[in-house]
Image (cartoon, rainbow, N blue to C red):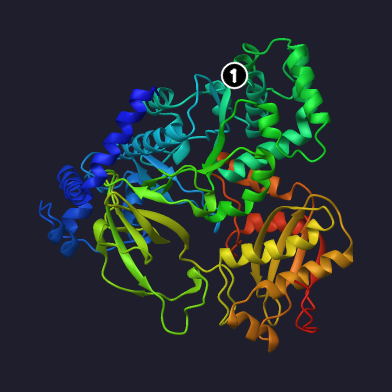
Amino acid sequence: MTVSCIETVIEQFEEMTRDPRRVQRETLRKVLEENADAEYLRNFGLEGRTDEESFKKCVPLCTHQDVEPFIQRIADGVGDSLAILTGKPITSLSLSSGTTQGKPKFIPFNDELLDSTIQIYRTSYAFRSREYPISNGKALQFLYGSKQTITKGGIIATTATTNLFRNSRFMSAMKDIQAQSCSPDAVIFGSDFHQSLYCHLLCGLIYSDEVQFVFSTFAHSIVHSFRTLEKIWEDLYADIRDGVLSERITDPSIRQAVSKILYPNPELADRIYNTCVGSSNWYGIIPQLWPNAKYVSGIMTGSMEPYLKKLRHYAGHLPLMSADYGASEGWIGANVDPSVPPEEATFAVLPNIGYFEFIPLERPIGEELESCAAVHYIESEPVGLTEVEVGKIYEPVLTNGAGLYRYRLGDVVQIAGFHNSTPKLKFICRRSLLLTINIDKNTEKDLQVSVEEASKLLAEEKLEIVDFTSLVDLSTDPGHYVIFWELSSDTSTEVLNNCANCLDLAFKDAGYVGSRKTNAIGPLELRVLRKGTFHKILDHFLGLGAAVSQFKTPRFVGPSNHQVLQILNRNVVGSYYSTAYGNLLSIC
């Protein structure tokens, strides 16, 4: 994207955010006009009206559970009318990651969602490029397609990322917007994730002097890539030294594409060798191997925050930039303040990519100190995009051209401020409990804080947590929390016993503390996993058709997720129970 294009995109954004109220009315009118014949809207008696008042009066708020029967009919090809959720037939479905209960959701995907994705990417890239100008070069992008399936009704179903990457219009737009990927398309769409990752790293090293930035959809994927680099760098070094691709690459399309750009380069190989051999802890390996990289980008909020410490370790002095705010259902806002650390990132709502409402959330008296997802919020009537107030918290509601009308996203966001007249959202949490047995209420954030506290004990032993998850074990009486850890190396029983105590005491929820003191909840159990366990969980989800760029480690494993539970339980190498509430001397 040229400097003039960057300024044009930014000016277009500035213009629409000066009067988002008008843009919102026009956006809703367009969505309702184009989808007036949709069965879903006709069922509510909207009768072609496109004004806000009629829309809100006729069409109720909904969740995925409400629209799932309509989406399933589209997938199954059931019914005489093709216009079930949208005026035009839906030709593709996206699969959500489905990593909590193990069952992915179908989400409609169409050209309108494609257009909004391109606009979000173009907007955030323009602001990043103004802050961190990049020259002509390439991007080290860890992107992965996944297999496509055909539903009973002949609809293509795959991950949202694959729906994008397999769309020629999207790929063309991306080439116009940002630097070209180091990797050929064959690597992105390879049949084997491990071979694709190997070749992403190899292609990135081949073009190491040209790489301008590092990107993947989620921070987890970037961390996983560089953890892999630590293990396989010698093979990559040999490939570049000899100009011969490793025999581990058996996918013919990948092998052919990568072999075309691989040639003997002893000088580059020596540089890689000296850098990797001389790296005792891999701190700053990204700028060492890719000296012209300007930043590292990906989604880094919410469930990705636990990976930031390790990502900063690999990135060294390079800034981390959180990518935009949205979901498989649709986009909401762009990060137009790229210099802000990921923990403080906000997202300016683009008023023309959907019609947005916000449900005001108020903490009841007595729950002021509860973590956000554990609160039983008092809800008020939804307000419009320009009616939100700074400092207050809301749940976003989305209406878009992809067949979702007044769809509750289930997130909690805070209004951090305004960009012109459009709100800037700060993601707070998902509105869902993870760990609860009786009156205790602990969330993903509570789990994260607990693990961070206990990890300080490991840091003293120069160990780190590779990844973690949890479950509620009700097979015991009383039930208890189970935390699964995979560690970078072995440690003593004493250290792990102390970690179990620390995890237990770090859950500060009053219901949990009171239940532990009265033994209404049993001692927390820390189960240490065999090395590579979370890699097996990743492989499991890839086998279900997920894309690694969409994968998020499940922080809680529900009872219906039998296969993931089996993987975890088969790989437990040690179990350590907390004694913290038998001996209330604090360890943390």
Residues 39 and 198: in front is: 198
Examine the image and state in which quarter residue 460 appears: bottom right
* Depth check, front residue: 22 or 467: 22
Dividing the picture into quadrants, the one containing residue 568 is: bottom right
Coordinates of residue 528 in the picture (x, y in percent): 78, 59
Question: What residue do we see at 29% from left, 39% from top?
Answer: 13
Residue 82 in sight from this viewpoint:
no
On screen, residue 412 above or below 520: above
| Left or right of 523, for residue 326 | left
Image quarter of the N terminus: top left
For disc 1, the marked residue is 253
Q: Across the whole image, how many numbered discs are drawn on residues?
A: 1
> Residue at left 65%, top 42%?
223
Of 222 and 247, which appears nearest the observer?
Answer: 222
Q: Seen in the image, is 224 located left or right of residue 588? A: left
Q: Is residue 174 above or below residue 572?
A: above
Above or below, comparing residue 33 to residue 469 in the picture: above
Q: Is residue 243 left or right of residue 13?
A: right
The residue that appears at 52% across and 33% down in the rendered structure is: 145
Measured from the top left, where is residue 530 in percent x and y? 79, 52
- Of residues 138 and 404, the one nearer the viewer is 138
Instruction: State left or right for residue 252 relative to residue 116.
Output: right
The answer to whether residue 235 is seen in the rendering is yes
Task: Please state which amino acid type lies under the numbered disc 1.
Answer: Ser
Locate residue 578, reporting x and y percent: 78, 75
Q: x, y percentage for residue 583?
A: 80, 83
